[in-house]
Image (cartoon, rainbow, N blue to C red):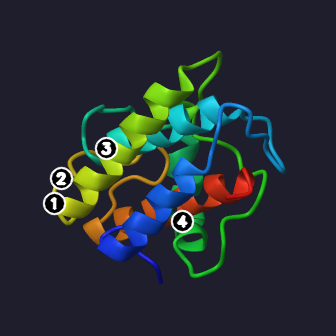
Amino acid sequence: MKSLLNAAYSKEIIERINHLTPASTPLWGKMTVDQAMAHLNAAFNNALGEVKQKREFWGYIFGNMAKKSLLSDKPVKKGLPTSKALKVKGEYNFEEEKEHLIALIEHYTATRGKDVNKYPHPFFGRLTAIEWDKLLTKHIDHHLSQFGV
């Protein structure tokens, strides 16, 4: 399994991000490229404990089952619902969001993910550092693939 804790893979992800432009269009889904960057930033901010988000009602019911599926080695399915805490709407400054995402990835890789695991995920609940890494790695790959990079 690929990991953002691996510096070479992290560099590959950043190169893919740098191939995005404000004109990049999704191959599927409704998010614009600026929204995708903001959405990924929200996910990293949650993982790094920058934002404490309430656990969602449906997460208590379905979170464990969904976590097992999402943390498997299978790719993330297209069209899965987005956690309320990570939904983004409106317009964002693409360059600012992109630069912020790259900085978060670099920080995460450089610190070996030591800052994760402070708060539960709003849908999946408590995650180990390894589970956070797998989730973040698969999540970012999913959205970069959504934009063809």
Residue under the image location 48 percent in, 37 percent down: 98
Circle 1 residues within 10 Å: few <14, some 14–19, many ≥20: few
Residue 136 on image: x %, y % = 44, 59
Residue under the image location 37 percent in, 35 percent down: 100
Q: Locate residue 116 relative to residue 148 in the image: left or right.
A: left
Mark 2 near mark 1, Cβ–Cβ under 8 Å? yes
Secondary element type, mark 4: helix
Give the image quarter of residue 21. top right
Q: Earlier in the sequence, mark 4 or mark 2?
A: 2
Task: Judge by depth and name the residue closer to the eye, 70 or 144.
Answer: 144
Mark 4 and mark 3: Cα distance apart in space:
18 Å
Mark 4: amino acid: Lys
Mark 1 and mark 4: Cα distance apart in space:
19 Å
Which mark, by number, is residue 103? 3
Quick one: quadrant of the C terminus? bottom right
Residue 19 in view here: yes
Residue 27 on image: x %, y % = 83, 50
Mark 3 near mark 2, Cβ–Cβ under 8 Å? no
Q: Earlier in the sequence, mark 3 or mark 2?
A: 3
Which mark, by number, is residue 138? 4
Q: Which residue is mark 1?
A: 111
**Above-or-below relation of 83 to 142:** above
Residue 82 on image: x %, y % = 64, 41
Mark 1: amino acid: Thr
* Disc nearest the viewer among 2 and 1: 1
